[in-house]
Amino acid sequence: MNIVWVAFRGHFSDSPRALYEALLDRGTDAGHTWLAAPHTQATFPADVDTVPFGSPECIAALEAADLVVSNDHIPLDWEKKPGATYLQTWHGTMLKRIHNDVLWAPEGRLAYLDQDIARWDLLLSPNAVTTERLRKSFGFTGPIHETGLPRNDLLSSPRRDEVRAQVRADLGIEPGQTAVLYTPTWRDKLVFEKGDSQDFEFAIDLEDFSARLGNDHVLLLRLHNMVMDRLEIADGSAVRDVCGHPDIADLYLAADLMVTDYSSTMFDFAITGRPLLFYTYDLDSYRDEQRGFYFDLEDVAPGPLVRTSDELVGAIADVEKVAKEYAERYARFQEMFCHLEDGSATERVLDLILPRAAASGQSTSISEGDDVRADR
C-alpha cells in the first residue's frame, strides 16, 4: 500500500502527521511519501521520504497512491488512481465561513478548489456542530465521520507534561515565565489584493507589552500558514517567532494562555483548559465584509473580546481574574466543541481508513451521504 501525506501544502504537521506516526508505531506494511515545501523541508525527519510539493515527482506520487491523506485542499492538477482513497481530515472547527459560504473570494478560486473536493472519499469532522457546516460549505456528498482531530490527541496524552517541559526548554522559556501564544488568522484581501502592501498586520503594541508585562512574559507568534513565511522580527523584540515550529500542538502545551482572533486554534487550545483572550480589532469588517461567521463570537467566546492593544495587554496582566469570570462560558464551549477530543481520535480514524485502503477500492458498508458518529 502506497500512502501520500500532505499538510498545508508541504508541512510535516497536523492530523496527517499524527496518523502517519501512529501507523509507524503499528508497524503497518506501507510505503510513505510526504509532500514537502522548500521552506519546510528542514523540519522533516531525515528518515522521512519526501518529494517537493507541486513538482512532477509530487504529481506522480499522488497518481500512484492507494491512499492520500491531506488536511487541506491540494491545489494541483492530478488524477486519482482508480480504487484509491483520499481522506480529507480538514484542519479544525470553523468560526469563520469557508469555501461556498464565504462573503468574498478571488474570481475562479473556489471553482478550482472544487476539483480537489471532487476527489475526496472521506471527510473528518471534529464535532457534531461542525458536520453539516462542512457538508454545506464544500458541497460534499460523501461520508463525513465525526471522530475528533488526530492532531489534538497529544493534548490529552499522558506525555503532555513531558512535552510541555521539553518544548519550553527548546524555546528558551524560563521557569516562571508566562508564555502567551498569539495565533492570528489571515485576512483574505490582504493576501489576494495586497498589491505592494504587506499581507498581514501586527496590531500589538510591543513596547507597551514589554513595559507593562516585563520579562515575566514572552509572546510566541504563530502566523497562519498562508502568511507565516513572510515574517520579520526585530532583534531584541519580546516576540519569539514560532512559525517554523513543526507542530502547533507542541506550542499549545508550551503556552500558558492564548491570544487569537477568529482562528480555529481557539477550539484546539480549549482542550487544555487554559485562558483564551480574543483580540478582535477588526471584528466588524471581518465578520460583516470579509468572511462572515457561523455563529456569534461575542455570545460564545470563552474569554473576553478586546478591541485595542491597550485592552489586550491589560487582560493579559489580569488573566487569572479573567479566567474566573469566564469559567462557566469556557465549560460550555468545551462541551460544544471539544466533546470528541478524548485522546483517541487517531485510533478511530485508523480503524476507519485501513480496511478501506486495504480493500483497494472495493465497496464499503458506508453509503454516500452518511454522517457517521464516532462510537463513544
Image (cartoon, rainbow, N blue to C red):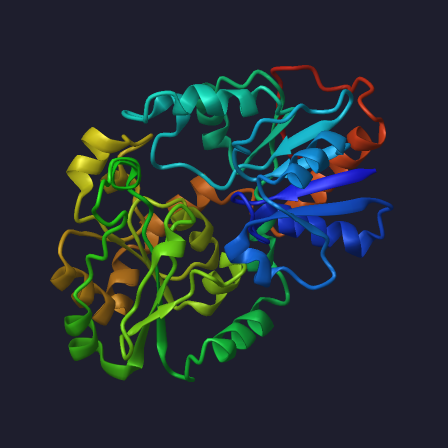
Picture coordinates of residue 275 (x, y %)?
A: 34, 61
Q: Residue at x 27, y 25 (%)?
A: 103
From this viewpoint, is residue 247 visible? yes
Image quarter in which the C terminus is found: top right
Q: Residue at x 39, y 54 (%)?
A: 228
From this viewpoint, is residue 344 visible? no
Picture coordinates of residue 20 (x, y %)?
A: 70, 49
Answer with the quarter of the image where residue 298 lies.
top left
Q: Residue at x 38, y 83 (%)?
A: 176
In the image shown, does 366 or 237 lie closer to the viewer? 237
Q: Up-down: is 186 above or below 38?
A: above
Q: Up-down: is 243 above or below 30?
A: below
Q: Is residue 161 left or right of residue 209?
A: right
Q: Residue at x 72, y 46 (%)?
A: 33
In the image shown, does 53 or 98 lie closer to the viewer? 53
Answer with the quarter of the image where residue 163 lies.
bottom right
In the image shown, does 106 or 83 lie closer to the viewer? 106
Image quarter in which the N terminus is found: top right
Picture coordinates of residue 195 (x, y %)?
A: 23, 40
Q: How many marks?
A: 0
Picture coordinates of residue 350 (x, y %)?
A: 73, 41
Q: Is residue 345 left or right of residue 292?
A: right
